[in-house]
Image (spheres, rainbow, N blue to C red):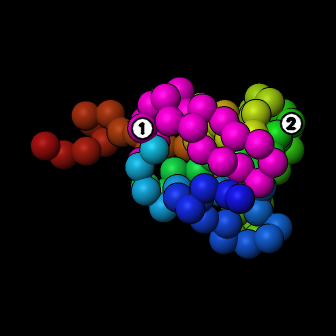
Amino acid sequence: MTDKRLLLISPADNVFVLRGVVEAGETIALEQGVTRVPARLGLGHKIARHAIGRGQEIVKYGAPIGSATSDIAAGSHVHVHNVKSDYTPTFALTASSEEVPL
């Protein structure tokens, strides 16, 4: 049985969305097996539903949202450190002091 803190938005998704906080060291149940979470993850973060290979699409809402930049194990955090957007050139908005008036 999958951990109640994991939300599967669409059956086509290869990520779960966290419904609540998972603390470092906690064990969570996936569809197939369990995994220990190495670092605290907050509400709304994604974890891999199953293993995702480098270059594979990340699917959320039943639609691709990016591609894996490295292999991602089942239960691992899926975020900017291992995903690239297929729609925008960067993951995070950055600005220099010249671009943003203070």
Give neighbour class at mark 1: few <14, some 14-19, many 20+ (Cα, 10 Å): some
Vertical side of 27 occupied by 15: above or below: below
* Quadrant (top left/top right/bottom left/bottom right) for the N terminus: bottom right
**What is the three-letter code of the residue carrying label 1?**
Glu
The residue type indicated by label 2 comes to: Gly
The residue carrying mark 2 is 53
Residue drawn at (80%, 71%) of the image: 11
CB of mark 1 within 8 Å of CB of mark 2? no
Q: Is residue 41 visible?
A: yes
- For the question of whether residue 89 can be seen, the reply is no
Percent of width and height locating residue 86: 73, 51
Front-lying residue, 35 or 97 = 35
Q: Nearer the viewer, residue 77 or 57?
A: 77
Binning the other alpha carbons within 10 Å of mark 2 as few (below 14), some (14 to 19) or many (20 upward) gives some
Q: Residue most toward the left?
A: 102
Q: Please tell me whether residue 17 is drawn above or below residue 91 in the rendered image.
A: below
Label 2 secondary element: loop
Based on the displayed image, in which of its 4 quarters is residue 52 positioned?
A: top right
Residue 28 falls within the magenta-colored stretch: yes
Highlighted range, magenta: 23-42
Label 1 belongs to which residue?
23
Quarter holding the C terminus?
A: top left
Where's residue 83, x and y in %? 67, 40
- Which of the 4 image quadrants contains residue 87? bottom right
Mark 1 or 2, nearer chain start: 1
What x and y, as percent, mark residue 31?
Answer: 77, 54
Q: Is residue 32 magenta?
A: yes
Residue at image coords 86%, 44%: 56
- 24 and 17: which is toward the camera: 24
